[in-house]
């Protein structure tokens, strides 16, 4: 219900429901079937009804203060009573104000309206029909098909004190009141008072403080939660401020933007698309870099904050002394003082980027290859580089024949003497003796011996097989005595494969060999060459940037292919 005034509720606390009917009045006592009293309605704009607005003088004046008594929902047939003073509406010759009090907080919002007959049309276009007497008012919310969604009943107040409610927030958004609100929802009031909504009234106002709750990466399909208060963004009529709290270190940077439809264009040319409701905001990157250093398709989700304390974040907002201080201007001019207060210090118009870093600080994002196990558990390991073949590949996945800590160098799991030939071994007779055909590190086999994994090596003269040029079990190969020389890609004297691509050991002409060699991002190809990876100069996989051998050196792209973002220091 109360659809016609719903726009006012976004800046005010939710109405607190009363445990009993409103005050000592017999008007509309939450019965659902309550009717307006049959009170004669004076006709004409006579002196008994001062303040009547417009030429619609066929009813008592709508102007005045009205206290919400109850609401009724036609769909459920239920009525809800409200405690006196929970919501007070003030109609005053084309301007309507609503005063909200949930018992803990007070707030006020305003907009404009016109009256035609018994229909009130608000600036954002949604009408209410009304029935009014000298003492009572009923607002009925329309619904498609001519039916009624419900109604709200009020009693007229002879007096009302607006102390403590603050300045009524108008429909205008932003510090510059020359810019109308993005829509009929109420944004922060501008300097020159209420301004009618612009034509793009299809969405709630972007203006206000927004707390980042999560970020999502398109390339990996992963979502990273962000602790409350870590990053708060303030959109304010063409100026955007970014408040960052990194382990207690608070900083603030500001820039400017323009809004066209659902596209935000920042001063540096980067763009985001937006999807906004009264309480949530999603910014999706359209152009690499975006507002928060994302790649196209990445997005950040926010929730709207009712209040935000910007103390200790630096100079991008105004301070206060006594009363409320004035806000800083983004172009560096000092803000004007609030009532009883001192004007805030001038803000910064500094725009930071990778080519203009003076007075800026770098925000280096985490990623696979930074030597830290982060990214909310998607890393199995992180050995501080992005290359395969050392146990931890370019996606921070553990490779075969290795064991890795959560962060740091990896260790091979191949053990000489366990009777199994692993990566890098040419023999393994179940011990680590040097004189029995297979040496103590399982890397050299005496050509005079035939060694079968897990069994003692036997002199070739006793078997007369390995070296005869005929492959027979358990031989893997046999090129003849002269050719079983162990050269790369050939046959070892023990008639097993010599070092080769696919054995899990980087040797010979190989760039890499992880034992799997499937060609996936950050791994090795079947030819033991590097698959697409961070550092090849091509943006692929989960990368945000790739400047080749300049990664980590040019101040733009990290060694793990994440874009470095700069904010005012």
Image (spheres, helix red, strand yellow):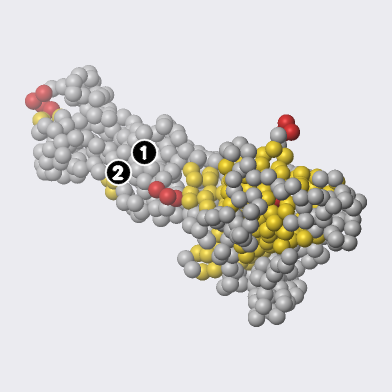
Image coordinates for residue 178, horizontal then vertical, percent? 82, 60
Residue shown at 54% from the left, 55% from the top: 20
Q: Residues within 10 Å of mark 1 (few under 14, many from 20)?
A: many
Image coordinates for residue 442, horizontal then vertical, percent? 19, 40
Q: Return the residue at label 2.
A: 402
Q: Are marks 1 and 2 in contact (CB under 8 Å)?
A: no
Q: In the drawing, does residue 479 fall left or right of residue 91?
A: left
Circle 2 sits in a helix, a strand or a loop, which is it?
strand
Depth check, front residue: 25 or 174: 25
Q: Return the residue at label 1.
A: 514
Where 333 sits versus 425, above or below? below
Residue 82 visible within the image: yes
Residue shown at 40% from the left, 48% from the top: 377
Q: In the drawing, does residue 518 fall left or right of residue 271?
A: left
Q: In the drawing, does residue 472 fall left or right of residue 375?
A: left
Depth check, front residue: 274 or 510: 274
Picture quadrant of residue 449: top left
Q: Residues within 10 Å of mark 2 (few under 14, many from 20)?
A: some
How many discs mark residues in the rendered view?
Answer: 2
Where 206 sits versus 520, above or below? below
Residue 206 visible within the image: no
Depth check, front residue: 367 or 228: 228
Badge 1 or badge 2: first in the primary sequence: 2
Image coordinates for residue 152, horizontal then vertical, percent? 67, 48
Classify the position of the N terminus by image quarter: top right
Depth check, front residue: 242 or 170: 170
């Amino acid at each position: 219900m109360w659809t016609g005034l719903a726009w006012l509720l976004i800046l005010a606390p939710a109405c607190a429901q009363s445990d009993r009917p409103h005050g000592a009045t017999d008007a509309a006592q939450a019965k659902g079937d309550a009717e307006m009293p049959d009170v004669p309605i004076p006709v004409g704009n006579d002196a008994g009804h001062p303040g009547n607005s417009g030429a619609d003088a066929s009813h008592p004046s709508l102007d005045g203060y009205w206290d919400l008594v109850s609401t009724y929902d036609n769909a459920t047939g239920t009525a809800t009573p409200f405690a006196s003073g929970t919501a007070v509406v003030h109609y005053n010759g084309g301007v309507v104000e609503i005063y909200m009090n949930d018992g803990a907080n007070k707030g006020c919002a305003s907009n404009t309206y016109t009256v035609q007959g018994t229909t009130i049309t608000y600036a954002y276009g949604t009408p209410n029909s009304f029935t009014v007497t000298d003492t009572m008012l009923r607002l009925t919310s329309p619904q498609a098909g001519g039916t009624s969604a419900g109604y709200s009943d009020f009693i007229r107040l002879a007096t009302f004190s607006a102390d403590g409610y603050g300045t009524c927030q108008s429909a205008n958004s932003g510090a510059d009141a020359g810019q109308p609100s993005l829509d009929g929802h109420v944004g922060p009031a501008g300097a020159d008072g209420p301004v009618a909504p612009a034509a793009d009234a299809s969405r709630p106002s972007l203006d206000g403080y927004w707390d980042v709750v999560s970020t999502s990466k398109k390339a990996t399909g992963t979502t990273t939660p962000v602790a409350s208060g870590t990053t708060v963004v303030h959109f304010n009529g063409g100026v955007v401020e970014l408040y960052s709290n990194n382990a207690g270190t608070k900083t603030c940077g500001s820039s400017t933007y323009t809004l066209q439809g659902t596209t935000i264009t920042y001063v540096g040319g980067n763009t985001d698309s937006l999807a906004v409701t009264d309480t949530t905001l999603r910014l999706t990157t359209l152009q690499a870099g975006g507002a928060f250093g994302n790649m196209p398709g990445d997005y950040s989700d926010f929730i709207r904050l009712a209040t935000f304390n910007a103390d200790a974040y630096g100079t991008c907002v105004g301070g206060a002394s006594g009363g409320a201080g004035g806000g800083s201007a983004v172009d560096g001019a000092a803000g004007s003082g609030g009532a009883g207060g001192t004007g805030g210090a001038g803000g910064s118009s500094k725009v930071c980027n990778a080519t203009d870093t003076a007075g800026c600080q770098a925000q280096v994002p985490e990623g696979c290859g930074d030597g830290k196990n982060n990214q909310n558990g998607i890393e199995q390991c992180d050995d501080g580089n992005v290359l395969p073949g050392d146990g931890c590949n370019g996606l921070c996945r553990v490779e075969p024949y290795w064991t890795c800590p959560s962060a740091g160098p990896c260790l091979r799991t191949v053990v000489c003497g366990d009777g199994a030939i692993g990566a890098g071994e040419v023999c393994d007779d179940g011990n680590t003796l040097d004189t029995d055909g297979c040496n103590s590190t399982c890397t050299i086999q005496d050509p005079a011996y035939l060694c079968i994994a897990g069994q003692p090596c036997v002199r070739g003269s006793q078997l007369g097989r390995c070296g005869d040029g005929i492959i027979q079990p358990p031989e893997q190969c046999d090129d003849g005595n002269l050719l079983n020389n162990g050269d790369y890609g050939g046959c070892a004297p023990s008639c097993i494969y010599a070092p080769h691509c696919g054995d899990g050991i980087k040797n010979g002409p190989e760039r890499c060999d992880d034992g799997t060699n499937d060609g996936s991002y950050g791994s090795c190809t079947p030819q033991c060459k590097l698959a697409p990876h961070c550092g090849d100069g091509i943006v692929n996989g989960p990368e945000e940037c790739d400047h080749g051998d300049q990664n980590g050196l040019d101040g733009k792209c990290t060694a793990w292919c994440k874009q470095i973002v700069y904010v005012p220091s």
